[in-house]
Image (cartoon, grey):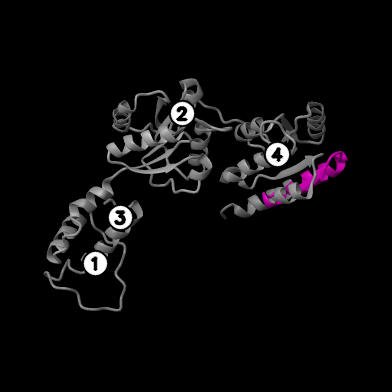
Amino acid sequence: MWLDFNQLIALRQLLLLQIAYFMVMDDKKPEKTTESPKDDLDLTYDQARDILEEYLAREQVISYRPADVIEELNRKRSMVIMGHSQLRNKLETALSLLEMEVVVYESFEEALTSDFQALDLVVLDAVQGDLHAVDLLHDLIKDMVLEPTYFVLVGESEAIARTGDWDGLGKGLFLRTSINPDWVPRKIDELMKQALHAPKKAKKDDEPKVAETRPLILVVDDEELLAVRLSKVLWLSGFRADTAGDGKEAIQKVRTINPDLVILDIGLPIKNGLDVLHMLRVFSATKSLPVIILTALRTEQIEDKAKQLGVVAFFEKPLPDDVLLAKIRETLAEKEISDSDLQPE
């Protein structure tokens, strides 16, 4: 019976702490002491294994062989994030054949509650809803939740998998959803025998770009005339501005242009404003992004939900430009103060 990863780490640590007492005791048990054993034992892996084997043999512990502990700790950890149940089960089986520990999730959002730090391999849908796996991996690496690692994207075509955007993610493999399951273990084994790509270094002749200091504001509204008019008002008021016409485009624009503030409508096509807000709060990079709601769709329930998701203001259309601009300036000033407080001295 396999122990899970956390149980194995705890077991190994407990055994190492116990056997530390026997290192200089010539096979005698240690005397009782009120001092706690140190957890920073300066042992190599081979030394730890040898001591562990000696300890278990001396104590006649036969229920779990030390070689099994070492083998279990050496198992690679993988995560499968797959919406299709049959495909998910096939991939889980394939990874088990490679003697990998497998954690399984159905959705990206569900997986985000997990620990990505110790993963050796991530296998996931190329796309789930409006969220692309490439964007998810880039965000996880950017937020230092995940190191560049081995990953497998599963989809209908390489175009859908966006293989051209894989730089900086680690070492990847694309699998079609129609692939013969019997081939999957060999494909993944071949992938993990390859060296991970090192991060690209900047070229010496690359000239530093001059940073644009004016705040960038994203206006999200499906009424194009309103969005364009508000964008012009913002440009004339000393800001930069961009627009998005639906929820999907809004999420993509936030990732690509990194705005300082978002003005968001609720009644959007594809994904409504509350859905967009929820997606923004999933990732630490946009968790604190200031959002001002400007909508004709105002109910107490919608406003309460928006405030729970951290909007800085909820306005009903139509709204005088000077009121909106005052709130934008106030919000950005507070954001600048907050950011400066987070800077190390």
Name the quadrant of the C terminus: bottom right
Do residues under tags 3 and 1 come within 8 Å of each other at their CB atoms? no
In the rendered image, residue 161, in percent from the top left (x then y), is placed at 48, 25
- Which of the marked residues, 2 or 1, is nearer the chain's N terminus? 1
Q: Quadrant of residue 317?
A: top right
Q: Amino acid at mark 3?
A: Leu
How many residues crowd mark 1 within 10 Å: few (<14), some (14–19), many (20+)? some
Please name the residue that numbered disc 1 is placed on: 18
Marks 3 and 1: which is nearer the front?
3
| Residue bearing mark 2 | 166
SS for callout 3: helix
Q: Nearer the viewer, residue 21 or 329?
A: 21
Which mark lies nearer to you, 2 or 4? 4
Answer with the quarter of the image where residue 289 lies.
top right
> Marks 3/1: CA distance?
15 Å
Q: Earlier in the sequence, mark 4 or mark 1?
A: 1
Which residue sits at x=57%, y=31%?
Answer: 208
Q: Which residue is mark 3?
A: 8
Q: CA distance from mark 4 to mark 1?
A: 56 Å
Query: Residue at 88% across / 40% down in the picture?
Result: 320
Amino acid type shown at disc 1: Gln
Query: Is label 3 in contact with label 2 (beta carbons under 8 Å)?
Result: no
Residue 320 counted in the magenta span:
yes
